[in-house]
Amino acid sequence: MKNFDLVVFDWDGTLMDSAAAIVRAILAASLDLGLTPPTEERARHVIGLGLDEALRHVVPGLPPERYPEMADGYRRHYLSCQHELVLFPGVENLLARLAERGCQLAVATGKSRRGLDAALDNFNLRAHFRALRCADQCLSKPHPQMLLELMQECGVAPGRTLMIGDTTHDLEMARNANVAAIGVCYGAHVASVLRAASPLACVDSVAELNAWLEINA
């Protein structure tokens, strides 16, 4: 018997290998504005948040009226390398196997809906997902709104839902929604930070995630 009827994935750093590109875009946008760029660690920490909240965290001293300028710069730098981004090895097989087992799949991401739509179409993955929630549709992680809306749309209770993500923002969102979570250690946040958030498990690869789900999900 399945333990979970709904499996919700983060996108960047969980399904798509994009964390490094996001960090580079944040640093480049900072330099464009003549700012001292944040450390890479600080830039990686905000991956998964909505863009506005992320930028306010990495450059807290920027005058409020200049955040739209930085957001435009970030988007420009990120889009310039978007065509180079790939899924983590094994993602397509993982999604297909979960769907074959009757799990509903969804995405909860800090990306914009436009950005997620482009990625889904680029990798031909849209048909796998029953529902999608993005940072420009909901409150930013770790607020539980994304998960609450996904569970309502899919008709699944918190106890039958699993969140999978590469950041503490994902794991804290799951906790705030009373949902179980898995941390993936190959994305933005390191294993020690993820384990401190007490997920059901932490995995080091998509293959290990697949094996865990085969047994436990």
Image (tube, rainbow, N blue to C red):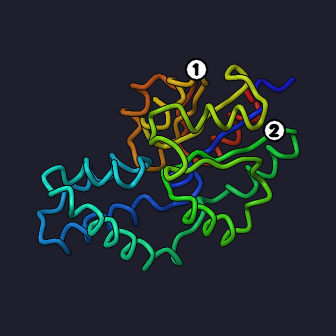
Residue type at tag 2: Cys
Of the pair 13 and 64, the residue shown nearer to us = 64
Of residue 52 and residue 43, the one placed in the foreground of this image is 52
Kind of residue indicated by mark 1: Asn
Residue at image point 53% right, 41% down: 165
Q: Residue furthest front?
A: 65
Assign a secondary structure to mark 1. loop
Give the position of the N terminus as an image quadrant: top right
Residue 59 lies, in percent from the top left, at: 19, 54
**Near-viewer residue (164 or 49):** 49
Residue 21 image point, x, y percent:
40, 66
How many numbered marks does the figure carry? Answer: 2
Residue 36 place in picture, x, y as percent: 11, 63
Q: Please, what secondary structure does the residue beneath circle 2 have?
A: loop
Residue, disc 2: 103
- Crowding at dot 1, Cα within 10 Å, few <14 / some 14-19 / many 20+, comes out as some
At 81% from the left and 47% from the top, the residue drawn is 97
- Measured in 3D between alpha carbons, the distance from the residue under mark 2 to the one under mark 1, in whole angstroms, is 19 Å
Q: Quadrant of the C terminus?
A: top right
For residue 51, the mark is none
Residue 178, numbered label? 1
Taking the spot 55% from the left edge, 34% from the top edge, the residue there is 145
